[in-house]
Amino acid sequence: MASTRIREARERDCADILRMIRVKPAGWKTECRGAGSGVVGAGEELAEYEQLSHQVKISEEALRADGFGENPFFHCLVAEVVPASGELQGQGIGTKIIKKVAEVALQKGCSQVRLAVLDWNKKAMDLYKSLGAQDLTEAEGWRSFRFEEEAMKEMAGC
Amino acid sequence: MASTRIREARERDCADILRMIRVKPAGWKTECRGAGSGVVGAGEELAEYEQLSHQVKISEEALRADGFGENPFFHCLVAEVVPASGELQGQGIGTKIIKKVAEVALQKGCSQVRLAVLDWNKKAMDLYKSLGAQDLTEAEGWRSFRFEEEAMKEMAGC
């Protein structure tokens, strides 16, 4: 049985964090979730698993600047698993991390944690629901909209 | 024709901001949108218009603490309209604010602006789409999940 430790991410974790955002290394089940510095928590999941790898544009340098500057854009927790090999799914690492996110969020004075989940990821949705989350898209009709940089520049008149 | 000025919110605007989050004053079309301190922008719309007034729990004191402390949870823009009377819908104030949000977000190094919209609010969705936004719930299947404080405390073992 592997042992798991959840800790705050450090600046030198950024190369690993970027790899985990992009791809799922063999035999490695990792969740990287941020307790947003805002009232709303932000979630980050594996782009490859989500079939959205092509959307990952961020660099290690940008991750360092965004997460470890004076007024960080995100906070990140990492799970260290010993031994770091074998298939790690089903050991409750995701549950441990999301519980820690709730703890950190409460400490920071947050009154909600929000997550974005893809509708085919039933496993994740079931986990969040089992822990007391509500599907706002289903319950209230919330939709998520995104402006990309090109549209932002157009709007700003750049 | 009324004239509109978009400016950064100040701490003393908090009473007005709270009123605008809760209800839509007669003859007053106001949008209050935050450029999140995170990579992701956060949107705030009128709870009464959204039929969600009962969900507004925040106090003026909490707004002051969250928005004007050392590491703010949110940033806010307000539109000042002169004269502040008459029906102000259809004068493009929403468009002006969302364009300013894009400008501020670019200045802060954000690469995206995300918004949450209720699915029956076709007017807002049409506006965002006309400005280049993509409906991620429709295009990629993103759903929004929320943990409330009670579930967070349960998870954190409080």
Image: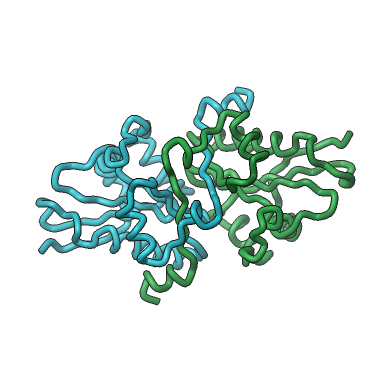
Chain colours: A green, B cyan
Vertical position of residue A38 compared to residue B109: above or below = above
Q: Residue furthest bottom?
A: A158
Q: How many marks?
A: 0
Vertical position of residue A26 compared to residue A102: above or below = below
Q: Residue A99 location, x and y as percent?
A: 65, 33
**Nearest the eye: A37 or A98:** A98
Position of B134 compared to A126: left or right?
left
Q: Residue A22 location, x and y as percent?
A: 71, 60
Which residue is located at x 75 percent, y 38 percent? A93
**Nearest the eye: B46 or A135:** A135
Name which quarter of the figure residue A54 lies in. bottom right
Position of B17 compared to B4: left or right?
right
Which residue is located at x 37 percent, y 32 percent? B55
Position of A138 compared to B43: left or right?
right
Which residue is located at x 33 percent, y 30 percent? B54
Q: Residue B46 location, x and y as percent?
A: 30, 43
Name which quarter of the figure residue B103 lies in. bottom left
Position of B91 compared to A117: left or right?
left
Q: Residue A76 location, x and y as percent?
A: 65, 48
Quadrant for the C terminus of chain A in the image: bottom left
**Nearest the eye: B74 or B116:** B116
Which residue is located at x 61 percent, y 29 percent? A131
Quadrant for the N terminus of chain A in the image: top right
**Nearest the eye: B131 or A43:** B131
